[in-house]
Image (cartoon, coloured by chain):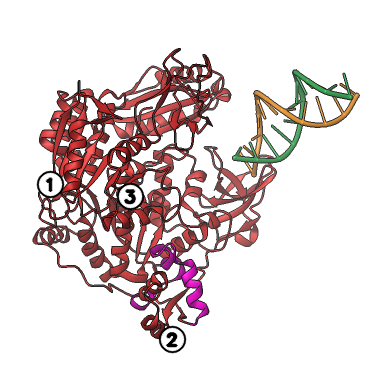
Chain colours: A red, B green, C orange
Amino acid sequence: MTVLVAAIAIPAPIYRLFDYRVPAAAEGLLVPGMRVRVPFGRRRLVAVVAEPPREIETEGREYKFIEVVLDQASVFPADLWALCRWAADYYQYPLGEVLSAALPGPLRRGDDTEIRRENALHISESGRAALETLPARSHAQRAVLQQLATTPCTRGQLLELLPKAAASLRKAMEMGWLLEVPLVIPDGVIGPALAPTPEQVTVVEALRSAAKGFSASLLEGVTGSGKTEVYLCLAADAVTRGEQVLVLVPEIGLTPQLLARFNERFGAGVASFHSGMSENERADTWLRARAGEARIVIGTRSAVFVPFAKLGLIVIDEEHDASYKQQDSFRYSARDLAILRAQKLEIPVLLGSATPSLETLHNARSGRYRHLKLESRVRQTAPPKIHALDVRTRALDHGLSHPLLEAIDRHLTAGGQALLFINRRGFAPVLLCHDCGWSAPCARCDAHMTLHRGRGRLVCHHCGAQQKAPTTCPTCNSKTLTPVGQGTERVEEALRARFPDKRVERFDSDRLRRAGELERLLADIRSGEIHILVGTQILAKGHDFAGLTLVGIVSADQALYGTDFRAIERMGQMVTQVAGRAGRGAQQGEVILQTHEPEHPLLRTLVEGGYIALSDALLEERRMAGLPPFSHLALLRAEATQADAPLRFLNEARNLMLADRESVQVSDAIPATMEKRAGNTRAQLLLQSASRAVLQRKLSAWVGQFDSLPSARQVRWSLDVDPGDLY
DNA sequence: GTGGCGACTGGA
DNA sequence: CCAGTCGCCACG
């Protein structure tokens, strides 16, 4: 008997597609990209049609029917569909899982694709009157009314701009100060452009002159050089042509300014897409972009899968940022997918960074990308010079040397602010017993637990395990427990003690857990109330602190001993980004980098020549070592509770690969850098090839066989194509 | 991923 | 002896 079946992609970690019979009512109507509800095992799942229906010979087999066809057309526009299929092949991940990752939650669960139309909030006559008569202290109330008086927007958009306005908004509604009007999306640009600098004009003109079609351009611009204004000009061009724009950013919560600038210029045409939004809000952006209503979508990694009716430009801000690479399950690079998407759509893509990744620099140098530079800072101050301070033999007060403390004093006295950067949370990374050598090991990881003295706890930063911090050694009862090394908490405390009349604030994920906390502290920095900032990378991201004149980097030496081939590149980016926070106001900034390795050639290159000189040196090293971008990598990882299973599995996989490896190098299977983590033993194996295509072809051939290896059942394995880290 | 099934362990 | 647990398998 022949039946009509369609291959369906199931959202489960299974590499094959499953054939289901097409119900008579759907014959001739079913196309790839439509969602369907199908019985799968005992369950009912929402899955996606992967291939057009076809007639097959049943050969006695019973095929289940598609139970419900949920869509009348593909939910994925053609370019997004092609992107997802490509990504599933390239990252060796099941298509059903990829499609599932591309859909917002409600659609994944089968909700319909109607846009729930929100009303825009406008200010009413009485609202205008109230604005005049509000008491001076009603800041929050005034902010809400003022915002809506200038730019009417939806409730969601308003709360994004004024995160704490929920109560004021409710009050304004009750008082009749607001009118709800069906949302009208403006056709074009609504706000005025700033007066661009001559340099910005040159860059924008150069980008405009690109031939129609695909082009990739690197916009290399130091912090404060005005990359955002360039994005805005090009976005305005696209919007004026009736096209949409996708803007990718590393973490939206850390860059409220960028969102605010786009909102000013494009008003209600801007929609955002990030993990801080509710699933329904994300679905709303997704559907509105698909309908062509959202002109500009600003979002994080997963926004690369937002569909568009007519996408005309993609911007990738801070393109070097590691958060564009997903580090678990579906390990895609949003940057790379965005570039591919632009290529397929034949539209331009603009990559912006002060510290471009080596991959991108290499592409720019080899002429594959255009390379544009913004070299002067908008506010005329010279970029800060980094001074490497040799701390060998110097006394350190909780990690801070005397010259650094002096410099802080000097800058504070001169009315400046200081920023201290340490890439480590907590008080101290190790709590050591001076008598017996006990060092607070984590029971489930090959790591020490970090002392968080404020909370009185030991916390493992790798598995999250916590316990009360002991006051006496648990093995020898001695009272000589000594915190070794320093984290943000310790430096904060040391600075408070040293500068008792100054306000010192810490910026790390522990401190900024509550919503709105970052905004509150940023405001206090701008107003000059905070004198010293101590923090992690959070401080290295796009904030503008006009009064900041000194940046102290407590130590960046860790990267110099690092095992990962990207460690120094990352360190250079971080140091340069954090140094860029200094001296954006009138005064020239000073940057002090404490080190025990002042002679290290790469550190010297960074200090003397800056990030670009460092990247030249690193690229040369990569060329010699045959590492990316001069080769392509994939990492096969395995972990298991049973200690010998991961290596056994990887060796089995290795034998399989060695038998048929073409021009792919297959490394030995080795234990991971931190072999035990969260109770699992971990191991890995590196695959390397000069040819991306060959590597991909071989991976496709191998991946399907891994699950049938004898020890596959004992491990959890994953394949990471273009890994960000090798551990 | 997840539910079902047979095999196994443990308490009564 | 039966219940709860565990590894293994199949899912169209």
Q: Quadrant of the C terminus of chain A?
A: top left
Compare residues B11 and A126 and report the one nearer the observer: A126
Disc 3 marks a residue whose amino acid type is Ala
Q: Is residue A80 left or right of residue A717?
A: left
Give the secondary structure at mark 2.
helix
Between circles 2 and 1, the one closer to the viewer is: 2
Can you tell which mark lies on residue A338?
Answer: 3
Compare residues A533 and A636 and report the one nearer the observer: A533
Question: Mark 3 or mark 2: which comes first in sequence?
Answer: 2
Q: Is residue A158 magenta?
A: yes
Q: Specify start and end residues of the magenta stretch as a single range.
A: A148-176
Question: Which residue is painted at 22% across and 72% down in the image?
Answer: A192
Can you tell which mark lies on residue A126?
Answer: 2
Question: Mark 2 or mark 1: which comes first in sequence?
Answer: 2
Q: Which chain's residue wears label 3?
A: A
Q: CA distance from mark 2 to mark 1?
A: 50 Å
Instruction: In the displayed orientation, state which residue is furthest to the front.
Output: A501
Labels 2 and 1 share a subunit: yes
Specify whether residue A620 is in view. no
Give the secondary structure at mark 3.
helix
Q: Position of residue A276 (x, y in %)?
A: 45, 54
Q: Eyeballing the image, is A536 above or below A133?
A: above
Judging by the rendered image, the residue that carries numbered circle 1 is: A383
Disc 1 marks a residue whose amino acid type is Pro
